[in-house]
Image: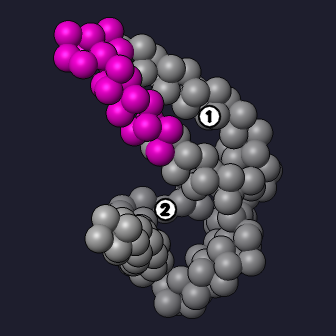
Amino acid sequence: MAGFLKEVMILSLKDYILTRILLAIPMMFILLIVIFFVLRIIPGDPVLAILGGKAPQEVIDQKRHELGLDKPIIIQFFDYVGDLLKGDLGKSTLTSRPVWNEIKDRFPATVELTLFAFIVAVLIGVFWEQKRRPIEMVLLILLQEFIQFSYMLFLYSGSV
């Protein structure tokens, strides 16, 4: 009986994880849509922010065409999604380098910061909860932090 219950629990946990992963896909697409259109609705002109207010109109029009901002918004959206699916995240407006390279350059520092935060959180958790079953608390904290760190590492590893 205990073996059957354990098997059912494992299957339901696998189903739960699979369901959560599958639900993440439409949620990411919805977020993509919302963020894209909110960034288009907010006031301000990205071309003027890049070039400055004193740029000649010809240069502004050329930059708008280069960025695809002269196209209808729905075409801009589908171009954006198509580029994302190809792995093209565009160019940084600050450095003019591909965003992908910017992410790769900063990823080691992100992992270092995450590891340091993990260690600090475990130490604080261990010393804070010493009065209550220290071994069980340490194991629970370590398990929780490991799962959270693994999830973040999985998310970031897909973008490198």
- Which numbered disc flags the more N-terminal residue, 2 or 1? 2
Q: Nearer the viewer, residue 92 or 146?
A: 146
Q: Above or below — where is 38 with respect to 124?
A: below
Identify the mark at residue 110; answer none if there is no mark. 1
- Contact (CB < 8 A) between labels 2 and 1? no
Q: Residue at 60% of width from left, 81% of height from top?
A: 81
- Where does the image place residue 59, in percent across and percent down from the top left? 72, 64
Task: Check residue 139 for magenta coloring.
Answer: yes
| Neighbours of disc 2 within 10 Å: few (<14), some (14-19), many (20+) | few
Identify the mark at residue 45; answer none if there is no mark. 2
- Where does the image place residue 94, in percent across and percent down from the top left? 68, 44
Extreme residue toward the front, this view: 1
Q: Is residue 90 left or right of residue 25?
A: right
Of the residues shown, which amino acid type is indicated by label 2? Asp
Q: Looking at the magenta stretch, what is its main secondary structure?
A: helix
Render colour scheme: one colour
- Where does the image place residue 18, in percent across and percent down from the top left? 45, 75
Of the residues shown, which amino acid type is indicated by label 1? Thr
